[in-house]
Amino acid sequence: MAENSKGVQRPLSPHLQIYRWHIPMLTSILTRVTGNALIVSTFLVVWWLIAAATSEAYFDLANGILTSWIGDIVMTLSLLGVWYHFLAGLRHLYYDAGKGMDIPTAEKLGWACLIGSVVLTVLTIIVI
C-alpha cells in the first residue's frame, strides 16, 4: 500500500510562486502585528506604573529599564505602532463606508498609512 501512494506528486500551493506583495496586503498584516505589539507595550507601561506605586527601589529598576536605550527604542516603536494602528483604523472605517475598495485607492491609502505614521511619530517626538 505504501508503494502506491509514494508516486503521487501533489503541487504546492500556487501562492508561493504566483502572488507578489501588495501594499494593502502588507498594511493588513502590519495592522495585526502592531495591534499585538501594542498589547506588549501596554503591559510594560502598566508594569512601570505598578512599580511606581510599589516602592522606590522597584520603580528605579522599572524606570531604569524603560528609560535605557533599549527602552527608548521599544517606546519609540510603540509610538510608531500607535500612530500606524490609528491611521489603519481610519482607513478601515473608510473601507466600511464602501469607499476606497478599488486597487489604486487601496494602494494610496496603504502608502498614506505607512508614510503618515512615520511623519506623525517624528512630529510627536519633536513635540515631546
Image (cartoon, rainbow, N blue to C red):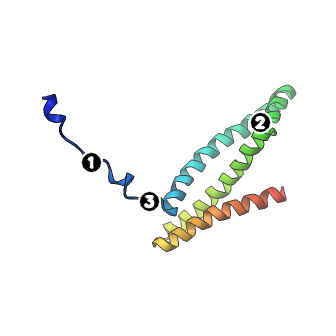
**Upstream in the sequence, badge 2 or badge 1?**
1
- Residue visible at 82% across and 34% down in the picture: 64
* Front position in the image: 62 or 30: 30
**Upstream in the sequence, badge 3 or badge 2?**
3
* Front position in the image: 17 or 61: 17
* Number of the label disc, if any, that sits on residue 11: 1
The CA distance from mark 3 to mark 2 is 42 Å
Q: Is residue 99 visible?
A: no
Q: Name the residue under label 2.
A: 48
- Residue visible at 74% across and 45% down in the picture: 73
Kindly indicate whether the residue at mark 1 contacts the one at mark 3 (C-beta within 8 angstroms): no
Helix, strand or loop at mark 3: loop
User: Residue 90, image x and y in percent?
Assistant: 59, 64
- Residue visible at 71% across and 43% down in the picture: 74
Q: Can residue 2 be seen in this view?
A: yes
Which quarter of the picture shows residue 61?
top right
